Amino acid sequence: MFPLTTSPKVSWQRKFSWIARFENWSWIFSGNLEKSIKSWLQLLESESNRPQLQIVRRLIEHEVYQEARDYLEKFIGIDEGQNAEIYYLMARCYMAQGLILEAMGKIQYALDKEPQNALYLEMEANIELEQGDWPAAIATLNKALRTNPQNSEILFRLGTVYTYHGEHQEALRCYQGCCKIKPHRAEYWEMKAESHVQLRQMAQAVVSFDRALRYGVNPDVVARLAYCYVQLNELKKGIHYFKLVLKHEPDHYDALCNLAAVYQNLGQSLEALHFQEKAYSLCKNDPILLNNMAYTLVQLGRSRKATEYYQEALKIAQENPLILYNLAVCHVQKGSWEAGIDTLGRLLKIEPDHPEGWALLGNIYEQRSEYERAIDCFNRSLKLA
């Protein structure tokens, strides 16, 4: 089977926008961010009686961490009523600057003051993830959900943690909850669909990708929908949606590669090569694409050029068993027995239980009239089959 690209397009990182809203500061909307930041810092210097946390939040949103931190430290222990948020904001600054232990200390102080604050708990979970303690992060996010069970953002965050660590059934439950709480958010349906894909539940994935497209036009989602149709063997629908992506985004790499794979599996090698060459013009160092192009060229009788692509793929993917086997097949078709034996030797060294490899090696020895060796190889292949 000609391989398709299977890596999901995961939308874990979402973009948040912010617009400063201060009276009589119309020039802020002109886009002069540097001028805005300078004015905010001047305001902080002029206001010394109580912490101006609204301005500090704006600075943090625009990655002005050190100045925000320096300012907040002046108020530690002074304004007891706002200490929790001061420490939370300091934790954000430390976290952004890579000072993970310091960030954990600050957020734990904030949680001592407000142990049920979901925002603070989510921050603690982020720090735990930075520390590599994802079980602790999951426990913290679940605690945050108990304090605010209808918070779809926390539930979505929990889902992404499960997804990252391959716990796709748990992730699916999280995304299902997100879709129930806010059914019109495209990214929730997209991630629910991706969980279905990972669980090989393609029919359910199609339904969820379709829902995602109702609430937001996204070429990546259309391409994933096409992929699911192909996996369900509904090739006409798959081709239709891949072409729809390419109509609006001609350089969509995954659509080009996967559409080529569909055509190759249908035996339409010239069509496949057309899309592969377009993809190759966009990326020349993808070993999967190089392998697939070589395979197509073999089907078109261009074994010499195919060998070059296989060798290029191996430079990138090193000793990849699939590429080594395909290269060996290419050598055999050209009658290059020694090159075929050498390539299969490399394959069987890293994967000694490769039945097709042993069978192909047996075929080479048979062609060379080395029948005892051929029989040994065929027997090894039969035992592994």
Image (tube, rainbow, N blue to C red):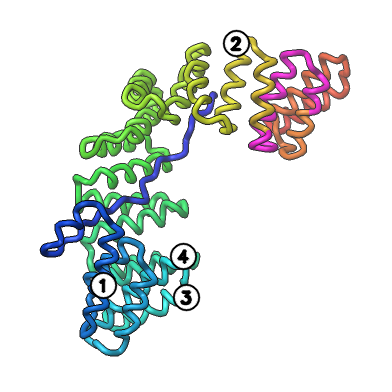
Q: Amino acid at mark 3?
A: Leu
Q: Is residue 91 above or below residue 196?
A: below
Q: CA distance from mark 1 to mark 3?
A: 30 Å
Quarter location, residue 156: bottom left
The front one of 290 and 45 is 45
Q: CA distance from mark 2 to mark 3?
A: 60 Å
Q: Secondary structure at mark 1?
A: helix
Q: CA distance from mark 4 to mark 3?
A: 10 Å
- Front-most of residues 310 and 75: 75
- Residue 319 part of the magenta segment: yes
Of residue 277 and residue 371, the one placed in the foreground of this image is: 277
In the depicted structure, whether residue 299 falls above or below residue 157: above
Where is residue 60 shown, x and y percent of the image?
Answer: 32, 66
Q: In the rendered structure, which amino acid carries the disc numbered 4?
A: Glu
Q: Within 10 Å of the Cα at label 2, are there few (<14), some (14-19), or many (20+) other Cα atoms?
A: some
Q: Quadrant of residue 39?
A: bottom left
Image position, residue 68 (x, y; %): 33, 72
- Which residue has dot 2 on it? 300
